[in-house]
Amino acid sequence: MNPTHTSPLNAKVGPADASTTQSDQQSAAVPQGKRPQRIFLHTGWRSGGTWVWSRFRALESVSALYEPLGALLGELSLDDIPDFRPDYTSGHPPLRSPYYEEYRPFVQKTGRGVNGYRKNFGIDRFGDAAGDDFPALCSYLKNLCDFSTGNGKVPVLKFCRSQGRTPWLKRAFPDVMHAGILRNPASQFASGWMLRQEWRNPFFVAAPFRVLGLNQGEPIVRQVIAMCGVKVPPVETASEEAYTVACTRYAQTAEGVEAYRAFVALWILCAWRMLNDVDLLLDTDRLGQSPAYAAGLRSEFQAATGVAPDFSAARNLVDEATRNVRRMSEIDGRLLRPINFSARKFLLAQIEASGGSQSPIAEIVRQKLSLADEISGQWRY
């Protein structure tokens, strides 16, 4: 995809509405030659990505694959597939088919697991150079895409573990449309925090500790951990499974401020890695606030890929986060502003070190962190 800004930021920040500048009002860039017929959605946990993915899945022309790097695929059997549907605590939209229905052709017939999947795919990575397992990951993803296109469908892969690897994936799959999904970190964190508080589900609180802890060997990860003051559980074993258990236990009792530090550290790290390389940015905070923005996104995808998902029924996630402030317990939002400031400081340091002028990225992140300050400032312990 051709960049839609003349600056180093490749991501076009969605279509225009009344709040966008003239430079944002360019139409989607369609590459010369063959139009890309594959889409990768790079999302974070609790970012609204599943709803966005469901809009593609509603199209008959699309084969929409859910979480191709998710750990469940390593143990999936054909008999399991009907059991994986949204429950009322997930906040996910109703689905016409189970989450993993599209994986039926890839599930091993006499055992468990999706062909080509490896369990080490399930942890995001942040190195400048791709890891040793990256060729196997690319082969696995290519097989998913090729099977879909061979059946006359447009493959749409929705990831939750790819934002750190977006630069690698962009180089490996240059003909794919790479779309990033971004939500302000306070709302995104709150969505996972309330699941821990109200339903004893610590997964989304544990995940940032796990990902940061398992990537401490990367200098950029050590830097964001230090700058945001994150306390990750010590890695006392080489086993990722054992460390996952340790992080889950840690998350069950972690103080709210400490959990937020880890979340924002991972959020800003992913934003930096992702925003440099995606072709289009979907702002899920704006999506439910502006019908013009939602309609414009549909046009963007249609122009670039030939598919036209309908985003008109998007929930207003900012209003929801504001209404839910009283549900946020065991965390004082007034203590979070310095953490957001540290995250922005980390980003500016990366921009300076890169030697390029990346003001569009800085402005996108500034707006998201300012909105996070506004929302979290209403939380009271």
Image: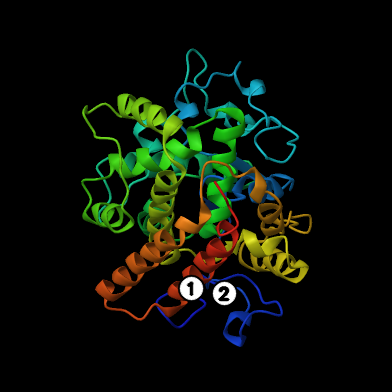
Residue 258: image quadrant is top left
Quarter residue 34 falls in:
bottom right
Mark 1: secondary structure: loop
Q: Name, please, the residue furthest toward the bottom.
A: 22
- Distance between the Cα atoms at labels 2 and 1? 6 Å
Which residue is under mark 1?
A: 2
Residue drawn where x is 45% and y is 65% of the image: 275
**Callout 1 amino acid:** Asn
Q: Amino acid at mark 2?
A: Ala
Q: Position of residue 177 (x, y in %)?
A: 53, 60
Q: Position of residue 95 (x, y in %)?
A: 73, 36
Left or right, residue 4 beside residue 135 = right
Left or right, 319 with reference to 151: right
10 Å crowding of disc 1: few (<14), some (14-19), many (20+): few
Taking depth in this image into account, of 230 and 286 the one nearest to the observer is 230
Colour style of the rendered protein structure: rainbow
The picture places residue 46, in percent across and down from the top left corner, at 57, 46
Left or right of 295 on screen, residue 188: left
Q: Earlier in the sequence, mark 2 or mark 1?
A: 1
Residue 29: image tag = 2
Query: Viewer-proximal residue, 165 or 211?
Result: 211
Give the left or right position of residue 242, taking residue 92 as reference. Answer: left
Instruction: Report if the CB atoms under discs 2 and 1 are less than 8 Å apart.
Output: yes
Residue at 71 percent across and 50 percent down: it is 55
Question: In the image, is residue 227 above or below residue 108?
Answer: below
Q: Quadrant of residue 20?
A: bottom right
Total numbered circles: 2
State whether residue 366 is above or below residue 53: below
Q: Find residue 107 and name its label.
A: none
